[in-house]
Image: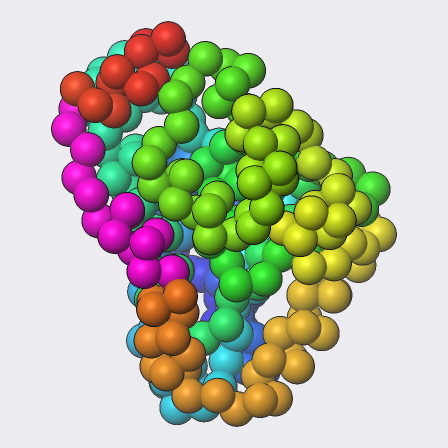
């Protein structure tokens, strides 16, 4: 299944390979997360959920990106002219994360470039993360750019970064983690050479998960129990003032 919506074609594509769905952020840009890109990703997930083969048999989703960046985080330049824009951007991403958590199939992020701040949140909101060894890093930039971390970001970190010392490295030292750092810290499942090798590894993992023939709705139900704290955090509607106060140094 290919993405045939011309307005979204340059932002992301959704390809079906057997029982695998590959969602790709397209182009050589930074894949900054603004409402337009997030809407395109949510639209792709909607089409995936309504695909007959996804609902009738075991399937898996792989999310990856073209170019140097997996995602370089929120589009703060877009948001800086308006406090409601910042709230909309945050609300849109929280909706996308909720939909990923509720998706009735395993999910894999194939991180082939930099994943920063909200981009790292997008990657970690998948069940598995495989990452390119020779390029890119995971990076929570809030300390370096003068932002207070969102409560729901922290909920994702707590669910995916187990050790307090690792959380300190990620959040309080703003460490730029390579794939091998991520594997060592238990954040990344495996490291691979090159973009093609990383996506290929995600495909192998996806096929192994599909072969288990799990009921997708049971899988999603269990994930929702495991990530209950994250779901509760992303449901919280921040006020314009709260969002703006957290980002005030950039507005």
Q: Residue 195: percent from the left, percent from the top? A: 75, 51
**x, y percentage for residue 240?**
17, 24
Q: Is residue 57 visible?
A: yes
175 on left or right of 2: right
Q: Identify the residue at horizontal 54%, vertical 30% (top origin).
A: 171
Task: Answer whether residue 110 is visible to the viewer in this image.
Answer: no
Quadrant of res 197: bottom right
**SS assignment for the magenta stretch, majority:** helix
For the residue pair 97 and 20, the one nearer the viewer reads as 97
- Image x and y of residue 69, in percent: 62, 37
Q: Residue furthest front?
A: 164
Residue at the image point whose x is 41% and y is 39% from the top: 154
Q: Between residues 196 and 134, which one lies in front from this camera angle?
A: 134
In the displayed structure, would residue 186 be above or below residue 154?
below
In which quarter of the view is residue 249 placed? top left
Way the structure is coloured: rainbow
Q: Count the numbered circles shown.
A: 0
Residue range in magenta is 227-240
The quadrant the C terminus occupies is: top left
Q: Residue at x 78, y 54 (%)?
A: 191
Q: Residue at x 62, y 74 (%)?
A: 206
Q: Is residue 68 above or below residue 49?
A: above
Q: Is residue 13 above or below residue 33?
A: below
Q: Is residue 220 magenta?
A: no
């Amino acid at each position: 299944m290919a993405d045939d919506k011309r307005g979204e074609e340059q932002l992301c594509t959704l390809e079906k390979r057997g029982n695998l769905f590959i969602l790709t952020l397209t182009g050589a840009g930074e894949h900054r997360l603004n409402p337009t890109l997030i809407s395109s990703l949510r639209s792709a997930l909607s089409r995936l959920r309504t695909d007959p083969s996804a609902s009738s048999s075991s399937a898996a989703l792989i999310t990856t990106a073209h170019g140097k960046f997996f995602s370089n985080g929120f589009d703060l330049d877009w948001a800086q002219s308006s406090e409601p824009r910042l709230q909309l951007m945050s609300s849109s991403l929280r909706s996308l994360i909720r939909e990923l958590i509720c998706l009735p199939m395993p999910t894999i992020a194939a991180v082939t470039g930099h994943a920063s701040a909200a981009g790292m949140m997008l990657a970690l909101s998948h069940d598995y993360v495989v990452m390119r060894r020779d390029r890119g890093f995971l990076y929570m930039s809030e300390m370096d750019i003068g932002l207070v971390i969102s409560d729901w970001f922290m909920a994702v970190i707590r669910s995916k970064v187990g050790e307090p010392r690792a959380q300190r490295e990620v959040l309080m030292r703003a460490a730029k983690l390579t794939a091998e750092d991520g594997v060592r810290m238990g954040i990344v499942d495996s490291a691979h050479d090159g973009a093609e090798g990383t996506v290929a590894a995600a495909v192998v993992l996806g096929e192994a998960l599909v072969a288990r023939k799990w009921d997708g709705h049971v899988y999603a139900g269990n994930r929702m129990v495991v990530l209950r704290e994250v779901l509760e955090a992303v449901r919280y509607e921040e006020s314009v003032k709260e969002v703006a106060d957290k980002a005030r140094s950039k507005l």
